[in-house]
Amino acid sequence: MIVVVGSINLDLTAGVDRFPHPGETIPGTSFAAVPGGKGANQALAARRAGAKVAMAGAVGTDGFAETALVGLVDAGVDIASVARIDGPSGIAMIQVDASGQNCITVIAGANGKVRASAIPDAAFGPGVTLLMQLEIPLATVQELAIRARRLAARVVLNAAPAIGLPPVLRDALDVLIVNEHEAAALAMAFGMPASPEAFAVAIHRTHRCATVVTQGSRGAVAVADGNLVSVGAPQVEVVDTTGAGDAFVGALVAALDRGTPWPRALAEGVAAGSLACQRSGAQAALPDASAIAGLASTVEPRVACRALD
């Protein structure tokens, strides 16, 4: 069972030939308003990867709330712990250029009012994986991580967007997931080496948590159980990278939640992220379990695993 506590947004996505320069106005090529938010995206990604998932968070009382939740509801994610809070729902303003790259501005709205007290102890325990991100208040993430760890749940944090993580939070994690840019930012804040492999090793040794660094088209590396695991990504035609990171996280966590060994779990995460790049949007691009399994079987031979010195 995976409990996701995180952001729920409506994504306002504009297609552009290129990103504008400061002060410049350019014409767009398309527009869509679709469900998003890292929390909701990862909950849906894990659900499509075959996991049983519950979502906790908050939406506002505006017209965006129902649209923001529709993807979760349709997929069978339990949203009983999603609160309705007076005020606006969270939104993300996304631009996607002709090469499929994106830039994103997130406005927290109701996500900024998610509180740990809204999630009871009964939500956690052995056999539960708690998955969080950093689009809700850091204090909420820290309190829930410490409480869930005390109650014997697995605690996974996708530290995105990158902000400073107190040592007490790092010590409460079982798994830390970041991309290479977030790893570099955290490495500077922590006084650790910035390269993906060295950062993952340093976090693993210092805080005893498995650490994963994604590297886009170059795949991912992880340090877990005293081993360095790396996997290359397959070549795909990139349409839109918006949901790729969330697809990776959801599929990886779904695999770990059902007891999959790290090398195969990492292959499934990379496969899911690669598949998501081939379609537009975030939630619309998230692949299902059969597609993930099929591509992961071709990715798995790329996995390299060696014991740390």
Image: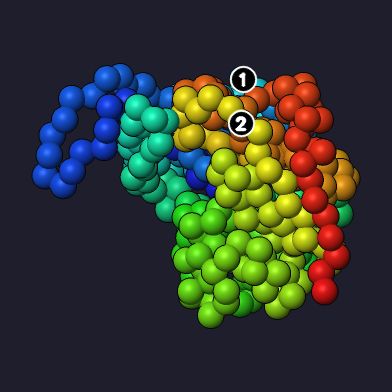
Circles 2 and 1: CB distance less than 8 Å? no
Please report the residue visible at 84 percent of the width from the left and 60 percent of the height from the top: 306
Q: Is residue 33 above or below residue 206?
A: above
Mark 2 and mark 1 lie on one chain; the one further toward the N terminus is 1
Residue at 53% x, 80% y is 191
In the rendered image, residue 119, in percent from the top left (x then y), is placed at: 64, 52
Q: Quadrant of residue 221?
A: bottom right
Q: Which of the 4 image quarters holds residue 55?
A: top right
Which residue is at the front of the view, 15 or 36?
Answer: 15
Q: Please, what is the three-letter code of the amino acid marked with disc 1?
A: Asp
In the image, which disc is placed on residue 74? 1
Q: Position of residue 49 (x, y in %)?
A: 73, 30
Disc 1 element: helix
Is residue 269 placed above or below 203 in the rendered structure? above
Determine if residue 228 is in view. yes
| Quadrant in the picture for the N terminus | top right
Q: Residues within 10 Å of mark 1 (few under 14, many from 20)?
A: few
Which quadrant would the C terminus be assigned to in this image?
Answer: bottom right
Residue marked by disc 2: 235
Query: In the displayed structure, would residue 73 be above or below residue 301?
Result: above
Residue 53: x percent and y percent? Answer: 71, 36
Of labels 2 and 1, the one closer to you: 2
